[in-house]
Every structure is written in structure tokens, then in C-alpha cells.
Amino acid sequence: MTAILYEHPLNERIRNYLKLEQLFVQAHSCADSDIQINHQVFFNALFTIIDTLERSDIKGELIKDLEKLQQNLVVWSQAPDIDNSALENNLRETVALTCQLKTNNQTWYQLKEDKLLASLKQRFAIQGGNSSFDLPQLQFWLHQPAIQVTAQIKHWLSLLTHIKHSLTLVLKFIRQRAEFKPIETESGFYQDSGEGLLLLRIKINRSAQYYPTISGNKFRYSIRFMLPCEKSGRRYSNQATQFELARC
């Protein structure tokens, strides 16, 4: 079926991972399109990535997850009918990324020292402060030769490559922890234990006229399905609801 996928983290670490993953998608998407039109989305994403890396020990969390993944890959290598080629590729990538993250000189720190980014970031931090008349420096930069602008954007993003690739690998294996299973509830409400879980993934048929709102933590989670409502914006659904759930 054609479905809409919803994901919900059950701890702060996975919340940061999903947030960064989305920001990387936005930044790279803008870099591959007309930056004069999409520059606000690009810089907002880039600055939020920098802020998230500064506030949270993403590097340390990723190292722990990669080391745990490395141990699991070694154990899985003993399983029968394993795809040794794919496993060895993942193992090599895991080891390489772990070594890169453990180096003292983290390349993304250079983004904090970039004079242009530092100047722009001050204005982007002010609500409504990133208009063209507030940032003549940005206007000047945007109108430099396209090859020059593109090269600088690629350089900035390259400084985040190790973080991005580590994040992609860790999330790939977290999502593979569970398969989707069909679930039906009569009341538009579902709850269960969250023990041992990191991430909920919900698929709902695109033609269905309801969507999930999710709350939870490592102990318990609940899914309440909602319906659009012209008067109040949304309202609770009390109807029979079908969806697919992967408990990762």
C-alpha cells in the first residue's frame, strides 16, 4: 500500500538523531538547488546543526552506538546464512567512522571559526533579522560566481561528513531492529510498554483520513489518532483504526 510514515523517538538521544537527519536532508537539498531562492532554509538548517552539536554530546553518543554496532556485527557474523559481503562492508564502515569520530580535531569545529558564517549566524539568531536589507554581506556572497558559491557550500557540508555518515549508519540499523506489523484498534487509541525501545515507526494508508499523535518514553507509549476538523483544527478519532507499527 502507499503509506505515510511517521516516526517518534522514545529518548532524547534518538530525538537529536532524527532532528539532525532532517536538517542534513534540508541542507543538502538546498545545496543541490537554486541557493539564491533557498538560502534561508540552507543557513537555518546549517546553523541549527551547529547549535545541536554544540549543546549535545552527539559525537560521544555516536561513538557509543557505533562501538555497540561493531560488537553486534561481529556476533552476527557467526550466524548461518549471513551475507558476509554486506556484513564486512558495514563492519569496515563502522570501524572507520568510529576512528574518525575519536580524533581530537573534529572538522565541524571549523564552521564555528568561519568568519562569514559567524557574521550571518548573529543575524539569523534574531527573529526576522535575516531579510535581504539586514544582510548586505549575504547578498554580496549570493551574487558571486555560481561555481564559487557552490564550492563554499560543499566545503561547509564536507566538514560535517563524518557526523552525517555516522548518523545515517546508526539510524539504519536502529530502523532494522523491527519489522512492521499490522494493528487494528476499535477506539482510535493504542498503548503498550516502551521497555527496551528506541523508536516507533508507524505506517498509515495515504487514503486514511486520520493521523497519529504519539507520546511516550522508555517505559510506556501511547498513540492517539486524530481527525482534521474545520472548527477546532483537529479532534480525537473514536473510529476503528488500522495501521502498521514497527517497535525498534
Image (tube, helix red, strand yellow):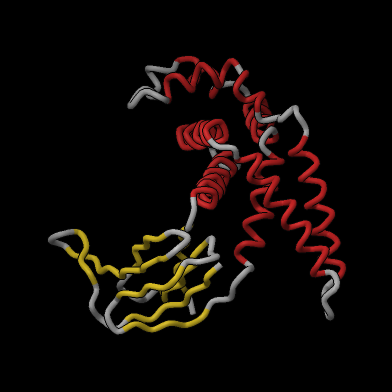
The answer to whether residue 35 is visible is: no
- Relative to the observer, which residue lies in front, 200 or 30? 200
- How far across and how far down the image is residue 72, in percent? 76, 63
* For residue 230, above or below residue 94: below
- How far across and how far down the image is residue 143, in percent? 54, 22
- Relative to the observer, which residue lies in front, 217 or 46? 217
Instruction: State the residue at coordinates (47%, 82%).
Output: 182
Q: Is residue 204 left or right of residue 27?
A: left
Instruction: State the residue at coordinates (76%, 37%).
Output: 102
Quadrant of the rendered structure where residue 178 is?
bottom right
- How far across and how far down the image is residue 161, in percent? 70, 40
Quadrant of the rendered structure where residue 157 is?
top right
* For residue 142, above or below residue 29: above
Counting every numbered tag in the picture gives 0
Q: Is residue 211 left or right of residue 82?
A: left
- Relative to the observer, which residue lies in front, 62 or 33? 62
Residue farthest toward the left in the current orientation of the protein: 231
- How far across and how far down the image is residue 168, in percent? 65, 52
Instruction: State the residue at coordinates (63%, 31%).
Output: 153
Considering the image in quadrants, where does the C terminus appear? Answer: bottom right
Instruction: State the residue at coordinates (65%, 30%).
Output: 156
The answer to whether residue 18 is visible is: yes
